[in-house]
Amino acid sequence: MLFAPTIAGSLPKPGWLAETEKLWPKWKLEGAELDQAKRDAALIWIKLQEEAGIATVSDGEQFRTHFVHGFLETVEGIDWNLKTKMGIRNNRYVVDVPTVTAPPKRSRPVHRDEAAFCRSHTKNGLKFTLPGPMTICDTLADGHYGRRADMAMAFAEILNEEALELEAAGCDVIQFDEPAFNVFMDDVKEWGIATLERAARGLKCKTAVHICYGYGIEANIEWKKTLGEEWRQYEEIFPALNASKIEQVSLECANSHVPISLIEYLSDKEILVGAIDVASTEVETPEQVAAVIESALGHADAERIQPCTNCGLAPLSRAVAEGKLRALGAGAELARKRFG
Ligand code: ZN
């Protein structure tokens, strides 16, 4: 199908599962009740995505509170009590982060059962998202390796174990989220893409990377003001990304300061064109979504374009997120009629 829509990843958690409209929501249940509620929430979002015409659906990250820590929680080698002050995203904000004190090791499969559950409930394409190695290393302090590239490669190896299991559980797309990719441009070229490829090694399903300028939190809004009118950071990394083995690149295009012409550097990739703004509570019209797709068509073949959300919809209200999903599906259909 031309312009087959998908989403970047997260969706809001229902009010009976967790606090709403928060980036770090607290669960409202415990134990077996919580596990059941997470499955119920995933099921609801799978059905709503299907009804909206989303071709490749996700669990909406209903099983985890945060896209990085959800994976790391059960990984050995991280001391969660040993906090180190660290400037995140090149000192955009300073937080106390857990410290890596030994080589990371998965004590058990992290998301496999969740993926298998989703697989058993949809015939659509299924995407599962994992944090990328560079973004993980920008969330943890290094108390063991002494070189960030080495720590990233160690995490890439356990991500790869996880990704292979997710594929075996029936996932069609494994996506690595790398919001750190527009901050450390030299590192991306030196080792970021290599660690990403290590994380995706041996996968036969589609592999994707989501890059982005982050949610609308205060520190990000201030940082974005320093980037100027045109955000051309990707110009530096896209040629290297295009030469990589990763097959899909997800990026923000709706109301974006990133010039759409930059996707010309991704001539060998499928492009997940963000046509839904996650920083606005205004629900797009199908016309607006089709217009973003049209702008991308000027710089990439139709066959390589998949309409998507700019980023995760998690911090929005459920009603707004549902509206945006429907707009995405309807906009893709409109584009199919118009440009197909
Ligand atoms: Zn994002």
Image (cartoon, helix red, strand yellow):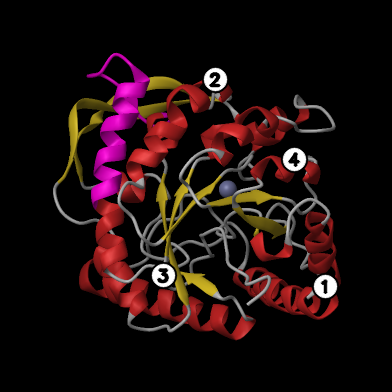
Which of label 2 and label 3 is nearer to you? 2
Q: Is residue 22 magenta?
A: no
Q: Which residue is labeled 1 in the image?
A: 339
Of the image marks 4 and 1, the number of the one nearer the N terminus: 4
Q: Do the residues labelled 2 and 4 touch (CB within 8 Å)?
A: no
Secondary structure type for disc 3: loop
Q: Which residue is labeled 3 in the image?
A: 17
Q: Which residue is labeled 4 in the image?
A: 262
Secondary structure type for disc 2: helix
Dot 4 amino acid type:
Leu
Of the image marks 3 and 4, the number of the one nearer the N terminus: 3
Q: Horizontal and vertical percent for residue 90?
A: 54, 21
Q: Which residue is labeled 2 in the image?
A: 186
Q: Horizontal and vertical percent for residue 253?
A: 74, 51
Q: Give the range drawn in magenta.
A: 138-161
Q: Quadrant of the N terminus?
A: bottom right
In this rendering, does residue 304 appear at all? yes
- Give me the C-alpha separation between circle 4 and circle 1: 21 Å
